[in-house]
Amino acid sequence: MKKTWQLLLTSILAVFLLTACGTTAAPEKPAVDDTSKEETPVVVVEEAFPVTLTDAADNEITIETAPATIISLVPSNTEILFELGLANEVVAVTDNDDFPAEASEKESIGGFELNIEKIISMNPEMVFAHEIAVGTGEGIQQIRDAGIPVFIVKDAKNFEETYATIEIIGKATGKTEEADKIIAEMKAKVDEVVAKVAKVEEKKTVFIETSPAPDIYTPGKNTFTQQMMDLIGADNIATEDGWFVMSPEEIVKQNPDVILVMYSYIETAVEDVYARDGFDTITAIKNKEVVQVDENITSRQGPRLADGLEAFAKAVYPEVFGE
């Protein structure tokens, strides 16, 4: 269901005028020449509201003023909101939101299971959901039915879509300049990383595992991770579409030069890969090139993805970065 809040006003103007004044301390002193005074010019500030935006579920939402209270339902949205300078406006997040550290101090509205009643009781001016996590369903509709705007953020598949996500959240919150700055900094970092790995003469083959045995999941074609591998000039041995399970036998057969471990909930994740039966013949094992990479900076669709790209590049081609 689409919800559209009607236009209440076209712009808000704020006028600030500063003037100086002088007095005569004694009769013998000359009078102050008013013509020499400098006046601060009138400053007119036009707000970017109201603004009408279309979210990932094709809902057209008109936002009358910058939301003063915001609830974020996924970590990637939270990271964007904080980077935009909206720490004070964010009043609640999920149990999974751990960056920046300040986010974990906010009120929690649940983990993978959201407390819809609590969200409604807090009556935020905006809820930012996510297409893949909670983009549809009864809970989201309950929030809308309570009169609370819900903006569903697109599940970004690449850097360009991530930039678009940051831009639209910036528009929805009145932080367009801040969003532009974040995007520019990310693009600069990506360009820097790409320029460094361009010096590599021989590509390495890579296997990326996102869960341990027995069900070893890996990202293949048409994933964000694949785009990152392409950007750093690495050959992903996983060639199927999306995320799928690859057998240990197939990994051994493909013989990757580097194995990237993208989970940290097991403390011995890297050691377990080295100890896996039959893996001793793999080049990555023999050359001690099993590297753990922070899954948050390489998978959350937000400002830290450029750092995630650099982390991948350093893990695959450490020599390029002097490591």
Image (cartoon, rainbow, N blue to C red):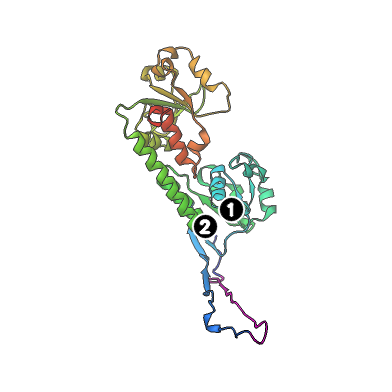
Side of 147 where 221 appears, left or right: left
Q: Which residue is mark 2?
A: 175
67 left or right of 121? left
Marking on residue 174: none
Secondary structure mostly taken by the magenta-highlighted segment of the chain:
loop
Regarding residue 78, the answer to whether it shows in the image is yes
Label 2: how many residues lie within 10 Å, few (<14), some (14-19) or many (20+)?
Answer: many
The residue identified by callout 1 is: 86
Residue 201 located left or right of residue 99: left
Mark 1–mark 2 contact, CB under 8 Å? yes
**Residue at screen point 34% across, 32% down:** 233
Question: In terms of depth relative to the viewer, which is nearer, 2 or 132?
Answer: 132
The stretch in magenta equals 8-28
Mark closer to the chain start, 1 or 2? 1
Q: Position of residue 237 (x, y in %)?
A: 37, 26
Relative height, residue 4 to residue 99 (above, below) = below
Residue at 39% from the left image edge and 28% from the top image edge: 317
- Going by the numbered disc 2, the residue's amino acid type is Lys
Q: Position of residue 302 (x, y in %)?
A: 50, 44
Residue count near mark 1 (Cα–Cα under 10 Å), binned few <14, some 14–19, many ≥20: some
Give the image location of residue 27, x and y in percent.
Answer: 66, 87
Q: Is residue 63 above or below residue 183?
A: below
Q: Is residue 24 magenta?
A: yes
